[in-house]
Image (cartoon, rainbow, N blue to C red):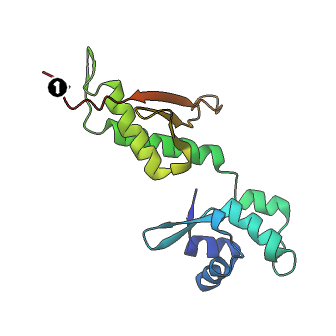
Amino acid sequence: MFLTVTQFAEKRNVTGRYVRKLIQTGKITRKSWKMQGKQYRIDPVKAGKDLSENLDRIYNPVRPSDELEQFPDPDQTDRLEIQDQAADVACEGEEFFPGGYTHPWAIWAARYVGELFLLSPDRVTIERISKTEWRLRVDDIDDEDFEPCPWAVTMTFDFDPNLVDG
């Protein structure tokens, strides 16, 4: 769950201008925020840890119990939410028929992986095996038991210009 600068500032009882200054001076580190368009989106858990290491012990002490109530650990929930968003995009325009879905699995997976890469690029990795083989790895989470369930696809490309599908 990412917050806007205003939302994060309200949670910390400071101004949005002060939060932007913390970002620009590195008190809230790069690992704790991302850009969405021209707006900062802040991970409150990571930013809270940054501030506790950099400032809170002196200027704004927060009891650990308050911190946990204010910012629950969003890791698994956020990852599943991103997976659901990617799956929704992959299913757009798809209809179910008695014989199955209109999109073959390979096309659905390609759309899913493409959207997942846009939403969370660190969860998709591509490895070159040889000139014509690549392995795509996807770091998914099981939505029932919240355990990791990564999967991979090996793709082989034939660059023969004489090959024509009829």
- Split into 4 quadrants, where in the image is the N terminus? bottom right
Q: Nearer the viewer, residue 71 or 76?
A: 76
Q: Is residue 52 above or below residue 135?
A: below
Q: Picture quarter containing residue 100?
A: top left
Rendered residue at 57%/60% (across/down): 2
Q: Residue furthest top?
A: 99
Task: Return the x and y of residue 14 as percentages of the image width and height.
Answer: 67, 81
Rendered residue at 40%/44% (across/down): 114
Q: Is residue 72 above or below residue 15?
A: above
Q: Nearer the viewer, residue 23 or 5?
A: 23
Q: Is residue 60 above or below residue 165?
A: below
* SS label for mark 1: loop
Task: Return the x and y of residue 52 as percentages of the image width and height.
Answer: 81, 69
Q: State left or right for residue 49 relative to residue 94.
A: right
Residue picked out by circle 1: 164
Q: Is residue 85 visible?
A: no
Task: Return the x and y of residue 60 as percentages of the image width and height.
Answer: 81, 78
Residue density around tag 1, few if under 14, some if 14–19, many if 20 or more, within 10 Å: few
Q: Is residue 113 above or below residue 28?
A: above
Total marks in image: 1
| Amino acid on which disc 1 is placed | Val
Task: Return the x and y of residue 112 as percentages of the image width and height.
Answer: 40, 38
